[in-house]
């Protein structure tokens, strides 16, 4: 009887060990190349890579202040994303994060610890580390493009109005010059019209002398 119990216990231990080994073998490997980018005063973006050949259905991130003991866990499944934005961070604070991959048979081992420090609120975000995949950076880029487009439209409209005003002024000067020249042609001096009559009248009167008598001889 004792031998039977010993054999049963051995069989149970072997089955449990084989199950643990199979589960551990089917777990995905730990994420690699974990990095932190887009540092701000209250947020940061974590990105990582997963070795090929394994089915990954989600991720888990542990976040902890370097000088504190409270941990914050972010877990997301049914996603193929390889990045996550950490919100509600404190400015000028040191943090430690680790990333785990979630597979069909459980979670992977935690990645290597990554340390980072948030910025001040007055610090500007470096332009050379921008990423189009970050929703916050994408929104900033779109607003800048919109402002640039509005400025270009305003400049074009002002140039068109300036061209129209200049053309109107030029046409007005031409019309004004034409009116002044035509009015000068129509006006003539009154002395030019009266002089010929005066001269002709003077010439006619100079030929007639009322003091001389006229003699008419009529032959019958």
Image: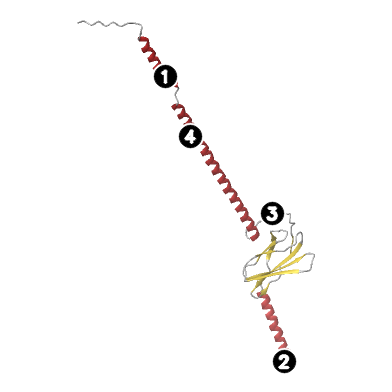
Earlier sequence position, callout 1 versus callout 4? 4
Earlier sequence position, callout 2 versus callout 1? 2
SS label for mark 4: helix
Q: CA distance from mark 4 to mark 2?
A: 124 Å
- Binning the other alpha carbons within 10 Å of mark 1 as few (below 14), some (14 to 19) or many (20 upward) gives few
How many numbered marks, from 0 up? 4
Q: Which residue is mark 1?
A: 194
Mark 2 vs mark 3, foreground winner is 3
Kindly identify the residue that appears in the image at 75 percent across and 66 percent down.
64
Q: CA distance from mark 3 to mark 4?
A: 60 Å
**Identity of the residue furthest to the left in this view:** 220
Kindly identify the residue that appears in the image at 70 percent across and 86 percent down.
12
Instruction: Specify the quadrant that holds the C terminus.
Output: top left
On the image, the x and y values in percent for residue 55 come to 62, 71
Earlier sequence position, callout 3 versus callout 1? 3
Question: Are the residues at dot 3 and dot 1 in contact (C-beta closer than 8 Å)?
Answer: no
Compared with 13, 192 (above or below) is: above
Compared with 178, 57 (above or below) is: below
Q: CA distance from mark 2 to mark 3?
A: 72 Å
Q: Which residue is mark 3?
A: 126
On the image, the x and y values in percent for residue 63 come to 73, 67
Question: Of residues 110 and 72, which is closer to you in this image?
Answer: 72
Q: Residue 52 vs residue 39: left or right?
A: left
Mark 3 vs mark 4, foreground winner is 4
Earlier sequence position, callout 4 versus callout 2? 2
Q: Which mark is residue 4?
A: 2
Q: Which mark is residue 175?
A: 4
- Binning the other alpha carbons within 10 Å of mark 2 as few (below 14), some (14 to 19) or many (20 upward) gives few
**Identity of the residue furthest to the right in this view:** 67
């Amino acid at each position: 009887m004792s031998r039977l119990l010993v054999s049963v216990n051995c069989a149970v231990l072997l089955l449990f060990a084989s199950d643990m080994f199979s589960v551990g073998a089917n777990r995905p490997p730990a994420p690699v190349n974990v990095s932190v980018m887009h540092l701000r005063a209250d947020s940061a973006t974590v990105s990582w890579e997963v070795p090929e050949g394994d089915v990954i259905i989600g991720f888990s991130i542990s976040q902890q202040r370097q000088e504190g003991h409270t941990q914050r866990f972010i877990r997301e499944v049914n996603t193929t994303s390889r990045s996550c934005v950490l919100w509600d961070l404190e400015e000028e604070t040191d943090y430690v994060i680790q990333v785990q991959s979630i597979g069909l048979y459980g979670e992977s081992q935690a990645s290597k610890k990554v340390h980072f420090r948030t910025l001040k609120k007055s610090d500007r975000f470096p332009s050379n580390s921008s990423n189009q995949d970050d929703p916050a950076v994408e929104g900033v880029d779109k607003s800048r493009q919109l402002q640039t487009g509005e400025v270009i439209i305003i400049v074009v409209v002002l140039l068109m109005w300036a061209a129209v005003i200049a053309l109107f002024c030029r046409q007005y000067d031409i019309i004004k010059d034409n009116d002044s020249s035509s009015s000068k042609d129509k006006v003539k001096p009154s002395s030019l019209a009266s002089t010929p009559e005066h001269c002709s009248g003077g010439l006619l009167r100079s030929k007639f002398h009322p003091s001389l008598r006229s003699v008419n001889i009529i032959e019958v």
